[in-house]
Image: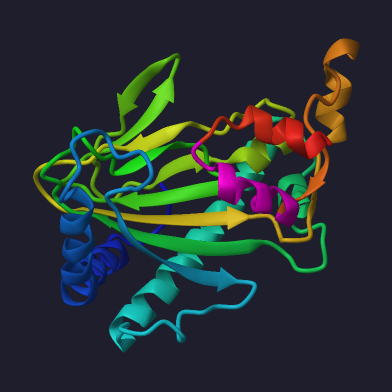
Amino acid sequence: NHGISHDLMDGVEKVNKEQYNKCREQKFNEFANKALENADSEIDHLDWESTFFLRHLPVSNISEIPDLDDQYRKAMKEFAAAIEKLAERLLDLLGENLELEKGYLKKAFSNGSKGPTFGTKVSSYPPCPRPDLVKGLRAHTDAGGIILLFQDDQVSGLQFLKDGEWLDVPPMRHAIVVNLGDQLEVITNGKYKSVVHRVVAQTDGNRMSIASFYNPGSDAVIFPAPALVEKEAEEKKEVYPRFVFEDYMKLYVGHKFQAKEPRFEAMKA
């Protein structure tokens, strides 16, 4: 019931797979062969992933990226508009579930001067000859708000960490996987947790991943919702920091593949 047309999703899948084959496959193969050439133990500083980023808000960059044809740009603009509506709807539902005032989470994302940021990471995970040496994408939590993933319905690889075990997120046709980032953990005072996830490289098939990130504005001040802090016992009040989202992102860039708790502690300072 995500409301996104299956025809649109099929079109988006088609143009993205074509774009990879035409513009990125050869370059990735050159990089990948070189990376594995002399490797005899696990490589912990790279991912078996070909990727680029489309920015939608505050200003789109889709017309500036080379090698994208008009059909691709049209399909992705339409898809981004549908995903943006879905993200805002889900924020309202998450807030309703926590008994926050209507629209609170969207306002929290927009409390700076610039409004929310929103973009899409387009990734391919080609077949990997040595999945014992390299991850498709190393384990991490996402820095931002709500993440909506349109993933390949044929090739698996995505896993979430739950109770110390890695669980597969199986491919499902025309589904959108909903994931939550660090900012929602802070704003909801830990009622919702950002999820550790990874992608396991596969020997067969090229996995497509289109992940859209609906995040706070760069100058938004992030802090636990007062209504949720007041409900907690005295000793548990506001265990999360208050910070500017852009400052958190600067820290995150260098510590993405490390635990999130030290990042929260660092932001308290």
Q: Does residue 87 lie above or below 5 as drawn?
A: above
Quadrant location of the C terminus in the rendered image? top right
Residue 1 located within the stretch drawn in magenta:
no
Reply above or below: 55 against 31.
Answer: below
How many numbered markers are drawn?
A: 0
Q: Is residue 163 left or right of residue 190?
A: left
Q: Nearer the viewer, residue 201 or 211?
A: 201
Residue 93 position in % (x across, y down)? 62, 40
Q: Position of residue 153 (x, y in %)?
A: 21, 47
Query: In this rendering, does residue 246 appear at all?
Result: yes
221 sits to left or right of 174: right
Which sits in the foreground, 110 or 162?
Answer: 162
Q: Residue at x 42, y 15 (%)?
A: 164
Residue 57, picture quadrant: bottom right
Look at the image and say whether residue 247 sits in the magenta stretch: yes
Check the image and name the residue furthest to the front: 38
Q: Residue at x 69, y 55 (%)?
A: 216
Does residue 54 appear to the left or right of 10 in the view shown?
right
Magenta: main secondary structure equals helix
Bounds of the magenta segment: 246-257
Depth check: 73 or 265 in front? 265
